[in-house]
Image (tube, rainbow, N blue to C red):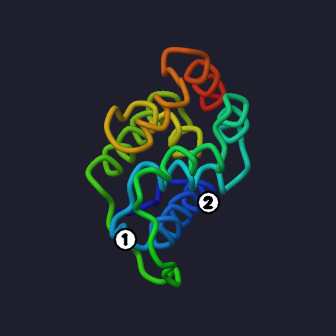
Amino acid sequence: MTYELFTERAREVFQRANEEALSFGKKSRIDTHHILLGVLKEGAGTAVHVLNAHGINVQSVRTEIEPLGEKGPYQDGRGKLPMTATAKNLVEYALQEARSLGPSSVETEHIVLGLLREPEGVAAEVFRALAVNRERDIVNFLGREAGK
């Protein structure tokens, strides 16, 4: 996957997602919940503030994914992992959001909109568990902010 259209902060999200997937040990691929954690751990921008305002933070996500039991021995963070099909879908959705909302570069907000569009994967389960609804104000707010 090439990230020329991604801003520095958006690229940082995927680096952090890779680190998260590696830290889970048993997980050999980056999935949507690793990307969600990457967004939250990147820590800046409208996307994080909106997610936090809706009760979505690193701890709440970890609480939701803990029952999955995928945590394993820590790996040292070297190596780039492949993505699951749902994570690849999310990247495509983020690119579509950037094209439709502008600017053409993918920001962290577009990544969150992509996460919200992807109905499968662990991040979708986390959003459902935390009662996040795409049709509510997150999409409206992020859509306005991403289009600025």
Q: What residue type is labelled 2?
A: Glu
Is 13 situated above or below 104? below
Residue 72 sits in which quadrant? bottom left
What residue lies at 52% left-to-right and 46% top-to-bottom?
A: 106
Q: Circle 1 sits in a helix, a strand or a loop, which is it?
A: loop
Seen in the image, is 91 located left or right of residue 139? left
Q: Residues within 10 Å of mark 1 (few under 14, many from 20)?
A: some
Residue found at the far top of this picture: 136
Q: How crowded is mark 2: few (under 14 residues within 10 Å), some or many (20 or more)?
A: some
What residue lies at 41% left-to-right and 75% top-to-bottom?
A: 80
Counting from the top left corner in percent of width and height, residue 60 is at 62, 43
Distance from disc 1 to disc 2, alpha carbons, whole Å, reads 28 Å
What residue lies at 53% left-to-right and 48% top-to-bottom?
A: 36
Is 99 situated above or below 35? above
What residue lies at 73% left-to-right and 30% top-to-bottom?
A: 53
Counting from the top left corner in percent of width and height, residue 40 is at 64, 49
Is 122 situated above or below 130? below
Task: Give the label on residue 26, or none.
Answer: 1
Q: What residue type is labelled 1?
A: Lys
**Camera-side residue: 109 or 58?**
58
Name the quarter where the N terminus is drawn.
bottom left
Counting from the top left corner in percent of width and height, residue 22 is at 46, 72
Answer with mark 1 or mark 2, whichever residue precedes in sequence. Answer: 2
Counting from the top left corner in percent of width and height, residue 52 is at 71, 36
Name the quarter where the C terminus is drawn.
top right
Is 33 situated above or below 70? above
Residue located beneath label 2 in the image: 8
Give yes or no for contact between labels 1 and 2 (Cβ–Cβ under 8 Å). Answer: no
Seen in the image, is 121 located left or right of residue 108? left
**Marks 1, 2: nearer the viewer:** 1
Task: Give the label on residue 59, or none.
Answer: none
